[in-house]
Amino acid sequence: MTDLAGAITSAARTAWWIVVVRGLLAVVLGIVALVWPGPTARVIIVLFGVWALVDGIIALVSIITGGGRSWGWLLLEGVLGIAAGIIAFRAPVTVALALVLLIAFWSIMIGVLEISGSLQVRQVPGSGWGWLLASGVVSIVFGILLFVWPDLGFATLITLIGIYALALGVVWLITAFMIRKDLKALA
């Protein structure tokens, strides 16, 4: 157990600030989503559409520049990317629903990983395992709510994402500074 504790302490010393950055980004996203849910929803769909379209075009160009390697998969990836981009611009409601379900799945998976991680480090002093556990539970509840009510409307989803991001960002900031405080106490 001391090897695990030493590895976690070493990682925490060199990377606690990454948790601060994640927390700050989540807080900013949360505030933007709460203040401007409609425009934020449109921006997310447009960004997805642009990304999918450009990614599809790049995949098709890669067929020519790739020397014939995996051209079938690149063709499929390119066609699907371009189609997804066009759908995002032509049928944003469909994309919104798909994004709701994708976010729900992602949130549940992140929650499971956070809970698992919290249980693995709960014996390590100063690990902030309780906050990580709480974050995992919030993530799972959020994902389940999105699966249960996927037709909430994308603006409502953006508001929920804003609340979730804001709460998660605060948890990450608290965790980061608790880790830093505990590391200073260990030193």
Image: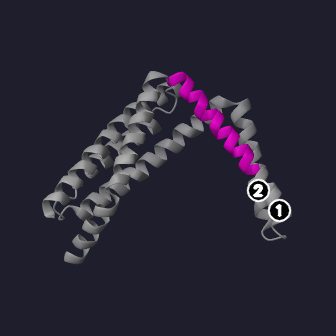
Dominant SS type (magenta) = helix
Q: Quadrant of the C terminus?
A: bottom left
Based on the picture, tell me whether residue 47 belongs to the magenta stretch: yes
Q: Quadrant of the N terminus?
A: bottom left
Q: Residue 41: x and y, percent?
A: 56, 29
Q: In this view of the protein, which residue sits in the foreground, 91 or 27?
A: 27
Marks 2,1: beta carbons within 8 A: yes
Q: Secondary structure at mark 2?
A: helix
Residue 142 seen in the current view:
yes
Magenta segment, which residues?
Answer: 37-56
Distance, label 2 to label 1, CA atoms, is 7 Å
Indicate left or right for 111 with 101 as reference.
left
Label tally: 2
Report the residue at 30% width, 55% height from top: 115
Residue type highlighted by circle 2: Ala
Residue 121 figure quarter: bottom left
The residue that disc 2 covers is: 59
Q: Residue 134: x and y, percent?
A: 26, 46
Q: Secondary structure at mark 1?
A: helix
Indicate left or right for 18 with 185 as reference.
right
Q: In this view of the protein, which residue sits in the foreground, 49 or 15?
A: 15
**Looking at the image, is 182 positioned above or below residue 171?**
below
Indicate left or right for 11 with 51 as reference.
left
Report the residue at 20% width, 60% height from top: 183
Q: Which mark is residue 63?
A: 1
Report the residue at 32% width, 36% height from top: 167
**Looking at the image, is 48 positioned above or below residue 127?**
above
Based on the picture, tell me whether residue 16 belongs to the magenta stretch: no
Q: Callout 2: few (<14), some (14-19), or many (20+) C-alpha neighbours within 10 Å?
A: many
Residue type highlighted by circle 1: Ile
Residue 1 seen in the current view:
no
